[in-house]
Image (cartoon, rainbow, N blue to C red):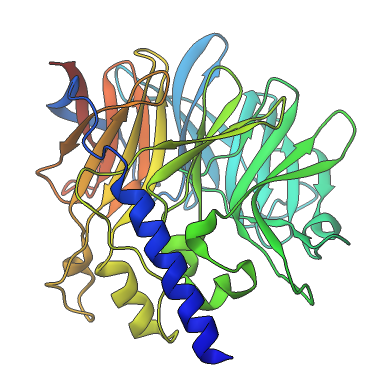
């Protein structure tokens, strides 16, 4: 039986590789990137650059840069041009409006309607600008168990490249990874949850693609934060652009219709992305470091382009020194129809690529600042060739 299983896996892998070879990996060369001065945001003595979450929101008809300040227990709102704080939202960690210290992501609808996500409690918490709780929405019962047809609910883990977003249909997107498969023999693990504020229902979407193999074995085959955590962005047509770390294609999911399409969005060189053999901390690190990983994807509404980050394999590293874990990055550029239209290799190395956003100035990728008074971003401006 084991020999037959091995033969089947070999055949499937051969077919998968053959299909990948047919793809035009280079695509068009219409765009590249031009390095601009760093983008900086001023930090005060109560704010650290180790923020886990930054997002852009339109507040009172003005686009603002926001960041979660875990040290000060608040959300800071910045003027993008000057990089200075213009407002803030208080978050309480004690008393009747206590939201705790486990906030992983937020969505600012208005300054008096902010949805926070408590990762450990599977709870959405709506607060106003003073941090007063408007309501709590406990979603734990909807997330913990597979459905009768073995649809495995997503386990949300919001971050900058897997943000909490509001759709035009009044649903909140919670993105993460596949959850507990339970006793299911043939589970379908979803990575997206859409909570409807209109009727309090949850819809699950975006299963892991074929490259991940049997969903029952995903936990044993892929690292949690290297390949199972899945990234996305939302465009102006209410389409989720989903980036699975092990897949050189993106998935475009129409939130309104439920339609799904796939487009090649891989790097020009061939990928080396295979399941891990024998899970351990050392094996997981080696699995991540020595393979390609597709990271976040970001919509540019100013140019109608999409940017997908690629982290390349790295072999010269020290398992005991995190400074050696920084991987070389590239940007794959897609046009409005998701055709590959260029790519760019970054010269600067960074381990903060999850902290990335797009402004009118270009693509901003987080980097460690040598000055603790500032949050710092590499800035790349797309240039047509």
The residue shown at (74%, 22%) is 169
Residue at x-position 51% and y-position 44%: 162
Rendered image quadrant of residue 362: top left
Q: Residue 182 at x, y = what percent?
A: 77, 74
Q: Nearer the viewer, residue 41 or 142?
A: 142
Closer to the camera, 314 or 149?
149
Foreground residue, 43 or 321? 321
In the figure, is residue 343 to the left or right of 50?
left
Residue 174 versus residue 340 in the image, above or below: below
**For residue 187, which quarter of the picture?**
bottom right
> Can residue 43 be seen in this snapshot?
no
Q: Residue furthest top?
A: 61
**How many marks can you see?**
0
Q: Residue at x 45, y 84 (%)?
A: 279
Up-down: is 313 above or below 114?
Answer: below
Q: Residue at x 78, y 42 (%)?
A: 203
Can you give x and y, in whole percent of width and height, for residue 96 in the image?
A: 80, 49
Quadrant into which the C terminus falls: top left
């Amino acid at each position: 039986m084991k020999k037959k299983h091995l033969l089947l896996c070999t055949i499937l892998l051969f077919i998968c590789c053959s299909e990948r070879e047919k793809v035009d990996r280079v695509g068009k060369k219409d765009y590249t990137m031009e390095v601009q001065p760093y983008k900086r945001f001023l930090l005060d003595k109560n704010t650290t650059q180790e923020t886990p979450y930054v997002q852009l929101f339109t507040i009172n008809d003005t686009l603002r840069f926001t960041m979660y300040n875990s040290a000060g227990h608040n959300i800071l709102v910045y003027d993008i041009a000057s990089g200075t704080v213009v407002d803030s939202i208080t978050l309480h960690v004690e008393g009747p409006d206590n939201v705790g210290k486990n906030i992983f992501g937020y969505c600012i609808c208005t300054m008096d309607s902010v949805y926070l996500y408590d990762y450990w409690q599977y709870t959405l918490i709506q607060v106003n600008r003073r941090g007063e709780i408007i309501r709590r929405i406990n979603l734990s019962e909807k997330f913990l168990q597979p459905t009768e047809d073995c649809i495995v609910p997503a386990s949300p883990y919001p971050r900058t490249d897997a943000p909490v977003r509001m759709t035009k249909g009044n649903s909140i997107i919670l993105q993460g990874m596949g959850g507990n498969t339970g006793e299911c023999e043939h589970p379908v693990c979803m990575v997206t949850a859409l909570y409807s504020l209109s009727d309090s229902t949850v819809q699950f979407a975006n299963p892991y693609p074929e490259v991940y193999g049997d969903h029952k074995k995903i936990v044993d085959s892929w690292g949690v934060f290297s390949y199972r955590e899945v990234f996305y962005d939302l465009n102006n047509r209410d389409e989720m652009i989903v980036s699975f770390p092990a897949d050189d294609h993106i998935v475009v999911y129409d939130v309104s219709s439920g339609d799904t399409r796939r487009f090649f969005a891989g790097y020009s060189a061939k990928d080396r992305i295979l399941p891990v053999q024998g899970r351990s901390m050392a094996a997981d690190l080696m699995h991540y470091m020595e393979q390609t990983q597709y990271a976040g994807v970001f919509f540019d509404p100013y140019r109608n382009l999409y940017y997908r980050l690629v982290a390349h394999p790295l072999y010269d590293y020290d398992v005991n020194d995190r400074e050696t874990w920084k991987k070389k990055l590239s940007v794959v550029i897609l046009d409005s129809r998701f055709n590959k239209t260029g790519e760019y290799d970054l010269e600067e190395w960074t381990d903060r690529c999850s902290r990335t956003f797009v402004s009118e100035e270009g693509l901003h990728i987080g980097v460690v600042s040598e000055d603790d008074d500032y949050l710092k971003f590499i800035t790349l401006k797309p240039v047509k060739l």
